[in-house]
Image (cartoon, helix red, strand yellow):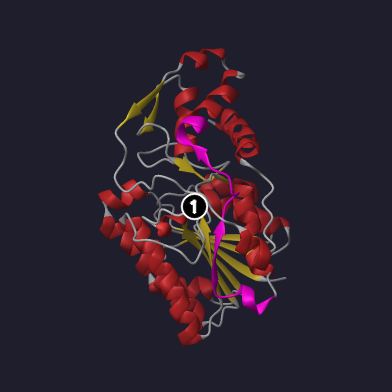
C-alpha cells in the first residue's frame, strides 16, 4: 500500500481524486488550507481508515516538509485558479502558485518522493493560434495565472535535472464536474451557468459566445492522474501532457446544452434569457487539445465527453444546490 499526498484535497479536483485513490486502497493524506476548498467535499471519507486530512498551507515551507515525509507519491492540485482572479490579484496568485509550488517540490526532492504529479494548465498555450494544442508548441502567456503555471513546468524540469526527482505535469483543459463550486466571483463557467439557470436568473456569456473550449469531465482528469502514477515506461516520466477529451464546444453551445437539460427538471427555465456582455481580459479565444501523447505514453483513455459529463454534473447540482 503506497502512501500518497493530495494537496488541494478539499477542492473540486482534489476531492474527486482523494475518493478514487481511497477506493483503490491507497493510504491518502489530504492537505488543504480551505481558502477555496470545502471540508464538506470530503465528507464521504470521514471515518475511513486510509484517509487523513491536515489543514495546512503550501506557502509554509515547514508545513510542506511535514506532510511530504513518508509519502511515496505526491499529487499537487493546490493552486489559486481563475484568470480573472489572477488579473485582480497577481501577487497572491504568484505566492500560492509559484512559491507554494516551489516549497512543495523542494520538500519532495529532499524526502526522495518517488514521483511528483502536478496540475499544469492549458492556459500555458497563451497566444499560440494553432489547433489542436500540442504539448511542444506554446505561445506567450496572456494572464498572470498562465505565467505561474508555465513557471511550474520550468521548475519541475529543472528539479528533475538538478535533484533527480521524477515529475509529470498534466495540462488540464477546462475541467468540470460534481463538487465544483458554483459560488463566488470566480466560479467556473459550467457551475455558474447551472446555478443561474436553476435560480431563474439571466445567464451571461462573455463575448459573442463563439469562443470555444475543450471541456473535460473530472473523471477523465482523475484517470489521467492515476495513470501518471502507474506509468512504468521511463519515457513517460518528466513530461507534460494534455488532459482533455479532444472535442471543442463553443460557450453558446454549452449554455444551450445546459439549458436543455435543466428545462426537463423545471419548465420555467425555458424563459431564462442568455445574454452577452464584454469579453474578459486574458481569455484565450479557442482551446482544443491533442491527447495523443497522453494516450501513447500514459495509456490515457477518457471515457466521458462533454454531454455525458453534463448529464452527471447537472444531476449532482440539482440534488445538492
Residue carrying label 1: 131
In depth, the one of 215 and 69 nearer the eye is 215
In the rendered view, would you say 295 is above or below 234?
above
In the rendered image, residue 204, in percent from the top left (x then y), is placed at: 38, 28
Query: Is residue 274 within the magenta segment?
Result: no
In the rendered view, would you say 319 is above or below 49?
above
- Pointer 1 local density, CA inside 10 Å: few below 14, some 14–19, many at least 20: few
Quadrant location, the N terminus: bottom right
Whether residue 48 is visible here, answered yes or no, is no
Query: Is residue 247 within the magenta segment?
Result: yes
The residue sitting at 41% across, 21% down in the picture is: 201
In the rendered view, would you say 246 is above or below 315?
below
The residue sitting at 45% across, 19% down in the picture is: 200
The residue sitting at 48% across, 24% down in the picture is: 197
In depth, the one of 316 and 69 nearer the eye is 316
Figure quadrant of residue 265? top right
Whether residue 139 is visible here, answered yes or no, is yes
Figure quadrant of residue 275? top left
Figure quadrant of residue 273? top left
In the rendered view, would you say 65 is above or below 317?
below
- In the figure, is residue 30 to the left or right of 96? right
- In the figure, is residue 161 to the left or right of 17? left
Highlighted range, magenta: 233-254
In the rendered image, residue 244, in percent from the top left (x then y), is placed at: 57, 52
Amino acid at each position: 500500500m503506497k502512501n500518497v499526498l493530495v494537496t488541494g484535497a478539499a477542492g473540486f479536483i482534489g476531492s474527486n481524486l482523494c475518493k478514487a485513490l481511497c477506493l483503490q486502497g491507497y493510504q491518502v493524506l489530504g492537505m488543504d488550507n480551505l481558502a477555496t476548498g470545502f471540508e464538506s467535499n470530503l465528507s464521504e471519507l470521514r471515518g475511513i481508515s486510509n484517509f487523513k486530512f491536515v489543514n495546512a498551507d503550501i506557502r509554509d515551507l515547514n508545513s510542506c516538509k511535514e506532510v511530504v515525509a513518508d509519502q511515496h507519491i505526491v499529487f499537487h492540485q493546490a493552486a489559486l485558479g481563475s484568470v480573472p482572479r489572477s488579473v485582480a490579484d497577481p501577487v497572491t496568485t504568484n505566492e500560492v502558485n509559484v512559491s507554494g509550488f516551489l516549497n512543495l517540490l523542494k520538500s519532495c526532492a529532499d524526502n526522495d518522493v518517488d514521483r511528483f504529479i502536478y496540475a499544469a494548465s492549458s492556459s500555458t498555450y497563451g497566444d499560440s493560434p494553432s489547433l489542436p494544442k500540442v504539448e511542444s508548441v506554446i505561445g506567450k502567456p496572456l494572464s498572470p495565472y498562465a505565467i505561474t503555471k508555465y513557471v511550474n513546468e520550468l521548475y519541475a524540469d529543472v528539479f528533475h535535472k538538478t535533484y533527480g526527482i521524477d515529475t509529470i505535469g498534466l495540462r488540464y483543459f477546462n475541467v468540470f464536474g460534481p463538487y465544483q463550486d458554483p459560488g463566488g466571483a470566480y466560479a467556473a463557467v459550467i457551475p455558474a451557468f447551472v446555478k443561474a439557470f436553476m435560480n431563474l436568473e439571466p445567464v451571461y456569456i462573455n463575448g459573442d459566445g463563439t469562443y470555444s473550449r475543450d471541456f473535460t469531465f473530472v473523471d477523465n482528469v482523475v484517470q489521467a492522474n492515476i495513470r501518471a502514477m502507474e506509468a512504468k515506461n521511463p519515457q513517460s516520466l518528466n513530461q507534460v501532457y494534455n488532459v482533455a477529451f479532444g472535442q471543442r464546444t463553443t460557450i453558446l453551445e454549452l449554455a444551450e446544452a445546459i439549458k436543455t437539460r435543466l428545462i426537463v427538471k423545471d419548465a420555467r427555465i425555458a424563459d431564462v434569457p442568455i445574454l452577452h456582455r464584454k469579453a474578459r481580459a486574458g481569455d484565450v479565444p479557442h482551446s482544443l487539445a491533442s491527447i495523443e501523447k497522453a494516450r501513447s505514453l500514459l495509456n490515457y483513455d477518457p471515457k466521458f465527453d462533454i454531454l455525458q459529463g453534463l448529464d452527471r454534473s447537472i444531476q449532482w447540482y440539482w440534488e445538492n444546490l
